[in-house]
Amino acid sequence: MLIKLYNGSIYDPSQNLHGDTRDLFIRDGAIVADPGPAARFDAVYDLTGKIVMAGGIDIHSHIAGGNVNTARVLLPEQHRNHMARRLNHPFSSAKWSSTDIGYRYARMGYTSVVEPAMLPVGALDVHLQMADIPIIDTAALAILGNDELLLRLLRAKAGQNQINDYVAWTLNATRALGLKIINAGGANAFKSNVRQFGLDDIVPDYGVSSRQILQTLQTAVHQLGVPHPPHVHCNNLGIPGNVDTIVATMEAAQGLPMHLAHVQFYAYGTEGAKGFSSAAAKLLEAFNRHPNISMDVGQVLFGQTVTISGDIIAQYSRHADASPSKYVMWDAETEGSGGVVPYRYRQASFVNTLQWAIGLELFLLAEAPERLFFTTDHPNGAPFTAYPELLRLLMDADYRQECMAHLNQEALALTLLPNLKRELTLSEVASMTRSAAATLLGLNDRGHLAPGAIADIAVYDPGQRTGARPDYRAMFADAALLFKNGRLVVQDGIVIERPAGLAQTVTPVYDAGIIRTVKQHFDRFYSLKLGQYAVNDADFGEHPRFKVHE
């Protein structure tokens, strides 16, 4: 099958293409070089006037797992009915079906999504849920940092090599793409009635600090050669003054690569009459000093959503703010804890306006957009279906000003946002949602449009305009065309095919002797056997499910 896409405006920062008019060629699911004038094409698409990018990559979106299912059960009244579908009213897909998740990502031109918080004991459940999501490729990050075996190894002064083997075994057993660390040690400390846990606080009964856990796991990921750096949810989420915590975490990173998640929730100062202010500039000053650090924003947008997290301390601290007034807190055997708290972000709220503004400040003040990534921490800051709205806010300064007129002015006065005129370019959007995202994750076969890449290609029509510029919200809401592995799956915002995606994994090498240590721990403390724990090919029938990245 040979396909030609011609005369499109290509945005591919990895090839230094910033609106250049080029042709693309697809053969058997991959992008290939120009086959020459004698080539006979099975399909030809004229992309004159269209914007062409690689398929979008979301590095942090909660799309599967126990918290997602719990949110569905907790909020049945928020399930979208047929009328809501016709009205296209966005609500967190934590309540949507797997089909909706795949369709809505595809309609926006996305082809790869990472579930950033997979509890190892629930890995099979996560992968089975992701296997039900059509069209998009998926991946998951395995959570360590609060599990009993790791803490016991650290208390016993285990060597780094043994920790490395345990991390590598976990990534293999759970078919993960990388490692997630959530408030290291905090969930375990919560079991001892600890309600606030800082970077240098000690986990009761284990004698190790959050910093020690974090640095040991970071060293393991680095020494194992896992492409994606440790994906870190810092201590003290949502607390005024916590900018000092995230800056200290950057400094604790030992100069090694580290990714900090949903940093909007850590860019909080203590200025002003309410003791709560924007510290986005301070965070970015530290970010600029640490080129080993990457971050995603976790933008807040207004409306109903639900917050889900393995950070039981943070979730428990705000359960009284639940809207509607119900919540779930849970504890998994020997591995971690978490909570599900519904929440509505309101325009009149001082706190919510400040959160909205801080996220935009981070995007617009950043000097290194190739290290800053586009997320809402779905569904915590907003559902991923709000991405087109966020893109318009970032790319249209006049629209941003219009929106600010309806918000809490006291909060806006504590930020730099009203004076920021910057507008993100299409090339910057392509970097943070495509090329740089693929590089961060180690997915070198996607995120770009060079020959050899898989043919994940998104085409957008900038025809709808608001004044002198395109209506970016409308443009990014519905792709004109989307090719997944060379197959046309979306046309004019309508899904026309639903192929199955693959799960992306890594398989770092480890000493098989660690299995004996793990088995002894399972036999003593777990209610399931070790043989029931690992994710196997046989769990998914005859069709291949996993793609390994070196």
Image: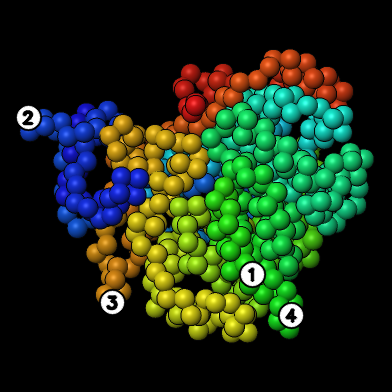
The answer to whether marks 2 and 3 mark residues whose Cβ atoms lie closer than 8 Å is no
Going from N to C along the chain, the mark reached first, 2 or 3, is 2
Please tell me which residue is depicted at 47% across the width and 22% down the height of the picture: 544
Please, what secondary structure does the residue beneath circle 1 have?
loop
The answer to whether marks 3 and 1 mark residues whose Cβ atoms lie closer than 8 Å is no
Q: In whole angstroms, how far apart are the C-alphas of marks 1 and 2?
A: 60 Å
Front residue of this view, candidates 144 and 191 = 144
Going from N to C along the chain, the mark reached first, 3 or 1, is 1
Give the labeled residue for mark 2: 38
Please tell me which residue is depicted at 73% across the width and 74% down the height of the picture: 270
Front residue of this view, candidates 429 and 251 = 251
Q: In whole angstroms, how far apart are the C-alphas of marks 2 and 3?
A: 44 Å
Rendering quarter of residue 297: bottom right
Please, what secondary structure does the residue beneath circle 4 have?
loop
x, y percentage for residue 128? 58, 32
Please, what secondary structure does the residue beneath circle 2 have?
loop
Going from N to C along the chain, the mark reached first, 1 or 2, is 2
Q: Is residue 473 left or right of residue 518?
A: left
Amino acid at dot 2 = Ala
User: As displayed, is residue 284 above or below residue 308?
Assistant: below
Amino acid at dot 4 = Lys
Please tell me which residue is depicted at 58% across the width and 57% down the height of the picture: 289
Indicate which label's residue lies in the foreground, 3 or 1.
1
| Residue 279, disc | 1
Give the labeled residue for mark 4: 274
Q: Is residue 447 visible?
A: yes
The residue most toward the left is: 38
Tell me the crowding category of disc 3: few under 14, some 14 to 19, or many 20 or more residues within 10 angstroms, Cα based.
few
Tell me the crowding category of disc 2: few under 14, some 14 to 19, or many 20 or more residues within 10 angstroms, Cα based.
few
